[in-house]
Image (cartoon, rainbow, N blue to C red):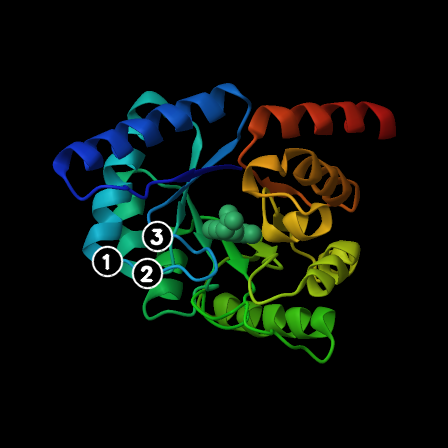
Amino acid sequence: MGVINVTPDSFSDGGKFLSHDNAVNQALDLIQQGADIIDIGGESTRPGADKVSIEEEINRTVPVISAIRKLHPAVTISIDTSKSQVMQAAIRAGANFINDVNALQSEGCIEIVAESQLPVCLMHKKGQPKSMQNNPEYGDVLTEVKDFFKARLDNCLSAGIKPENIVLDPGIGFGKTLAHNLALLKNIKQLKSLGYPILIGVSRKSMIGEILNEGVNNRLYGSLAIAQFAYEQGAEYLRVHDVKATSDVLKVTQALIS
Ligand code: 8Y7
């Protein structure tokens, strides 16, 4: 899964147009690099991020989804959102995968995903993006994340979402310290014991910065180390910025372990 953020740095029409074109070109590039899924997000979910209105999120993502869908009828386009209205608009524009960092807990989301019969990634997070990195605490992080998944699975399955359409994600960096993130990554097999495919998103995240004392632009090698580790632990999906580099690492790893 390759990451595309459509977050304009200007409020002028020129800025919006540029960010649209950039996003579409970047998506085409990631598909070229070997991405099977393109994840389109219109609201930053990074720690400390501000919220974006429904209308603004739709205006950012829907034209990008339509443009990619036109050029690539078969690629999987994921909408990264927690808002039911954005999910609905994105699905109409051609999105065929739902990535919800809020695990379909917002009003109306479960119903839309059940109705659409599309695959969905349910991610665990503790707290809200604005404050989630302020001293997150768990009794046992693995137990807590597994219990969260069990509760969300109950809800989603009874709402009519098919089990074969569900992917689980421990949400690396979402209300977690480095120690919490490491515990979750080391126990991917435990998460897999729930019987669902696992998605890991760790690309360029601050846990790598903490281990290496490197800024966001110097985290590629660290990201690749975790991608390879997660793959060997059985993670089925990896959400990454550097698709070609990750794909090469996984192809060589696959040759060695098969
Ligand atoms: C993840 C994610 C982000 C993740 C899933 C970033 C939207 C922060 N991280 N979605 N989104 N899993 N499923 O650094 O780990 O990319 S945003």
Give the CA distance from mark 1 to mark 2. 7 Å
Earlier residue among tags 2 and 3: 3
Instruction: Name the residue located 35 percent from the left edge and 52 percent from the top edge.
Output: 43
Q: Is residue 258 visible?
A: no
Q: Amino acid at mark 2?
A: Lys
**Could you say whether the residue bearing mark 1 is in a helix, strand or loop?**
helix
- Numbered circle sitting on residue 108: none
Say which quarter of the image contains residue 15: top left
Residues 240 and 143: in front is 240
Provide residue 33's location: percent of width, then percent of height: 53, 21
Distance of label 1 from label 3 (alpha carbons): 10 Å
Q: Which residue is mark 2?
A: 83
Amino acid tagged 1: Ile
Side (left or right) of 172 relative to 183: left
Assign a secondary structure to mark 3. loop
Q: Earlier in the sequence, mark 1 or mark 3?
A: 3
* C-alpha distance separating marks 2 and 3: 10 Å
When the figure is inspected, residue 42 is found, relative to residue 38, above or below; the finding is below
Q: How far across and down, in percent of the image, does residue 54 sit?
A: 23, 58
Q: Nearer the viewer, residue 133 or 153?
A: 133
Q: Is residue 171 visible?
A: yes
Please give left or right for residue 167 compared with residue 94 in the image. Answer: right
Which residue in the protein does label 3 denote?
A: 43
* Image x and y of residue 7, in percent: 32, 44
Pick out the residue farthest to the right.
Answer: 257
Q: Which residue is mark 1?
A: 54
Residue at image point 67% right, 53% down:
210
